[in-house]
Image (spheres, rainbow, N blue to C red):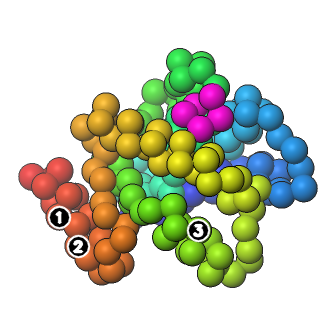
Amino acid sequence: MLETREPGGTPAGDRIRELFLEPALPVGAMTEVLLVNASRAQLVADVIRPALEAGSTVLCDRYVDSTLAYQGYARGVDLETVKRLCEAATGGLYPDLTFLVDVSLATSRGRVASRHGGSDRIDEQGLAFHDRVRDGFAALARLESRIVVLDGERAAEIVLEAAMAAIANFAA
């Protein structure tokens, strides 16, 4: 199994990630969409597609749904525009299964505060922004049968068990 993340996962993607998350750098909503999709295009070309072609399973922390939730639903970039840009970046490569680990805003804030390394530009957005992100993910989960919602308020071991059960069910 290959594990990767977005933005990042390649040398170019990691540089884009630094720029994308820099708290002192003001970045517009469309610029966010373009930056994350530039990183994504490189990740798909260099890492994800070759791994899949070699028969590996790929686990990616964030992907197209995150861009739709953050930049589409929360930032207000036209969803069809975001979808077209994501389609171009991925070459039509979408996950078979997506996990949405749902937590309250209070839990999310607590986890961000306890992370080593502090918060980033996205973490520092207000509660209203993060509420729109959560609503966006919920809307996507209602639209996409591949999205499995996991209760992130539960213990990590229970969340993992639920994810493994969903994978077993998918594979069956």
Between the residue at mark 1 and the residue at mark 3, the CA separation in whole angstroms equals 28 Å
Residue type, mark 2 in image = Glu
Is residue 98 or residue 74 the one in the foreground?
74
Q: Residues within 10 Å of mark 3 (few under 14, many from 20)?
A: some
In the rendered image, residue 63, in percent from the top left (x then y), is placed at 51, 45
Between the residue at mark 2 and the residue at mark 3, the CA separation in whole angstroms equals 24 Å
Residue type, mark 1 in image = Ala
Between the residue at mark 2 and the residue at mark 1, the CA separation in whole angstroms equals 6 Å
In the rendered image, residue 165, in percent from the top left (x then y), is placed at 17, 64
Is residue 90 or residue 143 the one in the foreground?
143
* Residue at figure coordinates x 39%, y 60% from the top left: 101
Residue carrying label 2: 161
Q: Earlier in the sequence, mark 2 or mark 3?
A: 3
Q: Nearer the viewer, mark 2 or mark 3?
A: 3
Q: Quadrant of residue 102?
A: bottom left
**Mark carried by residue 165:** 1
Label 3, secondary structure: give it: helix
Is residue 94 or residue 45 the one in the foreground?
94
Residue carrying label 3: 109
Number of numbered tags placed on the structure image: 3
* Residue at figure coordinates x 49%, y 70% from the top left: 107
Question: Which region is colored magenta?
Answer: 72-76
* Residue at figure coordinates x 90%, y 56% from the top left: 24
Label 1, secondary structure: give it: helix
